[in-house]
Amino acid sequence: MKTTSNKVALIPKMYCTLFGHDYQVSRNVTSHVKEYTCKSCKKELTTDSNGNLTELTPTFREINTILERVYNSKTERLRDKSVSSSIYQHV
């Protein structure tokens, strides 16, 4: 039974070896940083500080989580500031 599951697990990897990975965005961290997952073999990548794709390690996953939190709070602050300044312009 174990050999059957090993063969099933090899099929997506063989497909990716022959035809290449089919990455899809699995998470938008910021407007520039994203996480990608291969539809076939489930390999995960992310964008590093230079804009290159690199394997998504636990360290990169943690960095992306913190970066997403900082990015979201900054965009929320800017949105609130924009709304409040537009109110003052119309008065």
Image: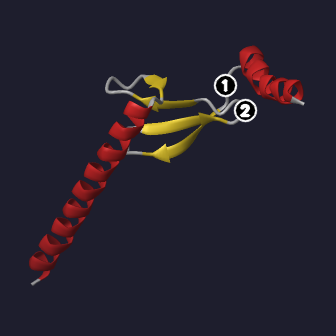
Q: In the image, 44: left or right of 70?
A: right
Identify the residue at the far top of this view: 18
Query: In which quarter of the view is residue 34 placed?
Result: top left
Looking at the rendered image, the quarter that the C terminus falls into is: bottom left
Looking at the rendered image, the quarter that the N terminus falls into is: top right
Which of 73 and 6 lies nearest the eye of the viewer? 6
The answer to whether 37 is drawn above or below residue 51 in the figure is: below
Identified at 24% across, 64% down, the residue is 79
Q: In the image, 23: left or right of 17?
A: left
Query: In which quarter of the view is residue 32 placed?
Result: top left
Q: Which residue is mark 2?
A: 40
Identify the residue at the far front of this view: 1
Amino acid type at circle 2 is Ser
The answer to whether 69 is drawn above or below residue 57 in the figure is: below
Amino acid type at circle 1 is His
Q: In the image, 18: left or right of 34?
A: right
Which of 82 and 67 lies nearest the eye of the viewer? 67
Instruction: Locate residue 15, reporting x and y percent.
Output: 78, 22
- Number of disc labels: 2
Q: Earlier along the polypeptide chain: callout 2 or callout 1?
A: 1
Q: Which residue is mark 1?
A: 21
Identified at 49% across, 46% down, the residue is 27
For label 1, count other residues whose C-alpha is less than 10 Å away and answer few (under 14), some (14-19) or many (20+): some
